[in-house]
Amino acid sequence: ESCATRLCTSSQDSDYPLEKTLNSSPIKSEREALLVGIISTFLHVHPFGASIEYICSYLHRLDSKICTSDVECLMSRLQHTFRQEMTGVGASLEKRWKFCGFEGLKLT
């Protein structure tokens, strides 16, 4: 299954996005669940966010087989846990990922 296919099955249009996300199982394996926990912890101590490169450099210390595109795809599927934002202006424009899991709890 490609990243694009997995992204299309995310729960953007639901009246109850958190429940639909849980029912459609965006996390496919225990390994992905572990990655979500580690990434969430990492971003929790980086409240202004972190680039995908920074996140993956941290993950590479734990597992050298981590693939940046797989990590980004996983985070993109979990829209109520992670959010990507653009910061800066002009040449210093940067994409940063932030943990937004606590905001997702308010939806229920």
Image (spheres, rainbow, N blue to C red):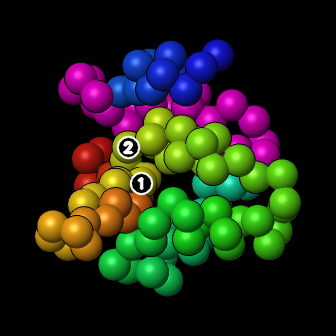
Image quarter (top left, top right, bottom left or bottom right) of the N terminus: top right
Residue type (three-letter) at the residue carrying disc 2: Gln
Residue identifier under label 2? 79
Residue identifier under label 1? 82
Residue 50 image point, x, y percent? 44, 71
Residue 68 image point, x, y percent? 63, 50
* Residue 24 can be seen, yes or no: no
Residue type (three-letter) at the residue carrying disc 1: Phe
Query: Residue at the front extreme?
Result: 91
Seen in the picture, residue 9 relative to 91 is either above or below; the reply is above
Front residue of 41/59: it is 59
Magenta stretch: give its range.
12-33
Q: Secondary structure at mark 2?
A: loop
Q: Secondary structure at mark 1?
A: strand
Front residue of 21/75: it is 75
Front residue of 12/93: it is 93
Seen in the picture, residue 98 relative to 33 is either above or below; the reply is below
Inspect the magenta stretch and tell me whether residue 16 lies in it: yes
Q: Quadrant of residue 91?
A: bottom left
Seen in the picture, residue 57 relative to 104 is either above or below; the reply is below
Q: Determine contact: label 1, label 2, CB under 8 Å.
A: yes
Crowding around mark 1 (Cα neighbors within 10 Å: few <14, some 14 to 19, many 20+) is many
Q: Is residue 73 left or right of residue 47?
A: right
Image quarter (top left, top right, bottom left or bottom right) of the C terminus: top left
Residue 18 image point, x, y percent? 38, 37
Q: Is residue 5 left or right of residue 102?
A: right
Query: Residue at the bottom extreme?
Result: 45
Q: Which residue is depicted at the point 54% across and 39% down?
A: 73
Crowding around mark 2 (Cα neighbors within 10 Å: few <14, some 14 to 19, many 20+) is many
Which mark is on residue 9? Answer: none
Question: How far apart are the two marked residues, 1 and 2, measured between alpha carbons?
Answer: 5 Å
Marks counted in the figure total 2
